[in-house]
Amino acid sequence: MKKRLLLCCVLFSLVAVTTLQAGEPAQLTKLAAEQKKPKKNPAPKLWRALNPGKLQLQSEAALVVDRFGNEIYSKNADKVQPIASITKLMTAMVILDSSLPMRQELVITNADRDLLRMTGSRLEPGATLTREQLLKLALMSSENRAASALARTFPAGRKRFIYAMNKKAISLGMRSTTFTDPTGLDVGNRSTPRDLQKLVRAAMRYPFIRKATTSRSAQVFPYLKKGQLRYVNTNRLLGSDSWDISLSKTGYINEAG
C-alpha cells in the first residue's frame, strides 16, 4: 500500500519526486497518514523521523521538501552552481509549451555534436527520429544530441530557445537560475536547490515529462538500414520496487559537485 507522503528531493546529481511505500519505517507510516489533510507545518515531525543528523551526503547541496512544500532537509539550499543535465527538465517544458508537432521527424547533424566535453552518442549525424522520441531520450537517457537537436530546430533557432528557457525560469520565480544551453554540458547552466524545487514542481504538471523520466527503457529506429537502439533510464532507483517515483532527472558534470 502506497503512503500519501510525497517527497521532492533535489540533489546536485538528481532530482526526484517519490511517494513512500509499504516497508518504510512505522513512524513514517504514521506521519504519512497524519498528512492526509494539510496542516500548518507538518515538517518538524517528519524531520525528526528522518533523523537528518545521521544523513551522510556527498552532494555539496541538497533540499528535501514534502508535498506541502515544507522543508524536511537542506544543505546549502541557496548555493548557486552548475546543474548539469537537470537542465533538460527546462528544455522539455519549453518544447512542450511551444506546441510544435511532436511527430515531426528531425535529423541529427554535426551541429549537435558535443565539442565542449567531447561526449559520445549513438545518434550519429543522419539519425532521424521524431520530436517526441528525441524529447523522451533527452529526459530518460539524458541524450545530449537529442536535446541539442530540439533546440536547433526550434523556431528562430537555438538562441531563441535559450531565451525561452530563461524566460520560463523567471516566470517560475527561479531568481538564482541561468540557462546557457539545452543539454546542461555548459557550466553556465546554474541554479540552486531551492530554485530547482520550483523547476520540479512545474515539471510535475506535464504528463509527458512524468512518464518519460520514469520509463525504464525505450527502443528507437533512427537509421533506415540498421536495427533498433535500446536506451535505458539513467536513474538506477527506477529499477527498485521500493520507490514509487513520479518524476526523475539525473545529471552530472565535474563542476556540479
Image (cartoon, rainbow, N blue to C red):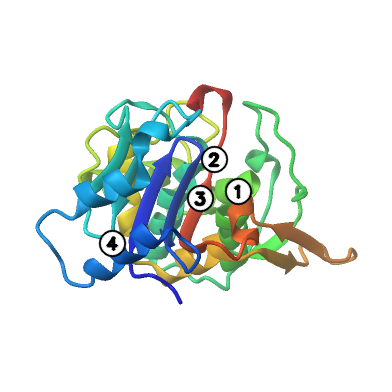
- Marks 4 and 3 close (CB-CB < 8 Å): no
- Marks 4 and 2 close (CB-CB < 8 Å): no
Residue 217, placed above or below residue 73: below
**Number of marks present in the image shown:** 4
Q: Picture coordinates of residue 244 (x, y %)?
A: 50, 66
Q: Picture coordinates of residue 102 (x, y %)?
A: 52, 70
Q: Mark 4 to mark 3: distance in Å?
A: 27 Å
Q: For the residue marked with disc 1, what is the amino acid?
A: Ser
Read off the residue under disc 4: 31
Read off the residue under disc 3: 249
Read off the residue under disc 1: 142
Q: Earlier in the sequence, mark 4 or mark 3?
A: 4
Q: Earlier in the sequence, mark 1 or mark 2?
A: 1
Q: Mark 1 to mark 2: distance in Å?
A: 8 Å
- Marks 1 and 2 close (CB-CB < 8 Å): yes
Q: Residue at x 31, y 40 (%)?
A: 73
17 with respect to 85 (left or right) = left
Read off the residue under disc 2: 251
Please tell me how crowded label 3 is: few (under 14), some (14-19), or many (20+) other residues with Cα within 10 Å: many
- Marks 2 and 3 close (CB-CB < 8 Å): yes
Please tell me how crowded label 1 is: few (under 14), some (14-19), or many (20+) other residues with Cα within 10 Å: many
Dot 2: element? loop
